[in-house]
Image: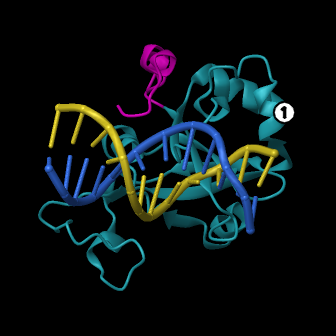
Chain colours: A cyan, B blue, C yellow
Amino acid sequence: MLGFTALQARAATHFHHGEDGMAYWLLKTEPNVFSLDDLKAVEKEPWDGVRNYQARNFMRDEMKPGDKVLIYHSRVQPIGIVGEAEIVSEPYPDPTQFNPEEKYYDAKAKPENPRWFVVDVQYRRTYDQVLELAALKKTPGLENMVLTQKGSRLSVQPVRAEEWAVIQQLAGLA
DNA sequence: GCCAACGTTGGC
DNA sequence: GCCAACGTTGGC
């Protein structure tokens, strides 16, 4: 697990699929490429283009339909969590890896041995205000969140149930 | 746009 | 299998 700190590794057992079988995730996106509004417009979209093995492993091995997702906008002002979505498919091979015309083409990936995976993500809600990264870093209960760790670049992150609950409070939903 | 922090690649 | 060089991410 490259790049996973000891702290995160120790806490990882608390990340996934509790008694109700549901897990929580955070997906990063650059809104000039694909925003939460874009997802709202199309309702459902394969989350393609993930080309990092740790992120891939979460998608391929752990994501399940019904899992809840925080959508995070990076490289914009304001940066932060903007709303929610839901995973609505099992993982399946990312079709863009097989297409030489695609930016995300991977010559080493073969249909009989796919390297990269997607899940379909469905729009759920947009928060009234952006939950900004700077504020999240100061929020009690989010100290160990993957997102708030220094240097954290992972674009597909697990979120603990306790962290999800804190986010719900911040979003005025609890 | 800069650049620190990450990840990956490939020579040895 | 080490690690320097390179490429990318993403906050600022």
Q: Residue at x 70, y 23 (%)?
A: A142
Give whichever of B7, A171 is nearer the camera: B7
User: Taking A126 as reference, is A25 above or below it?
Assistant: above
Q: Please check the rendered image and state whether residue A113 is part of the magenta-colored stretch, yes or no.
A: no
**Residue that badge 1 annotates:** A135
Q: Residues within 10 Å of mark 1 (few under 14, many from 20)?
A: few
Q: Total label count? A: 1
What kind of residue is marked 1? Ala
Span of residues in magenta: A1-22
Does residue A171 appear in this view?
A: no
- State the image coordinates of residue A132 (x, y, percent, origin top left): 81, 42
Q: Is residue A12 magenta?
A: yes
Give the percent coordinates (x, y) of residue A43. Answer: 61, 66
One can see residue A121 in this view = yes
Residue occupying image coordinates x 77% and y 39% = A133
Element under disc 1:
helix
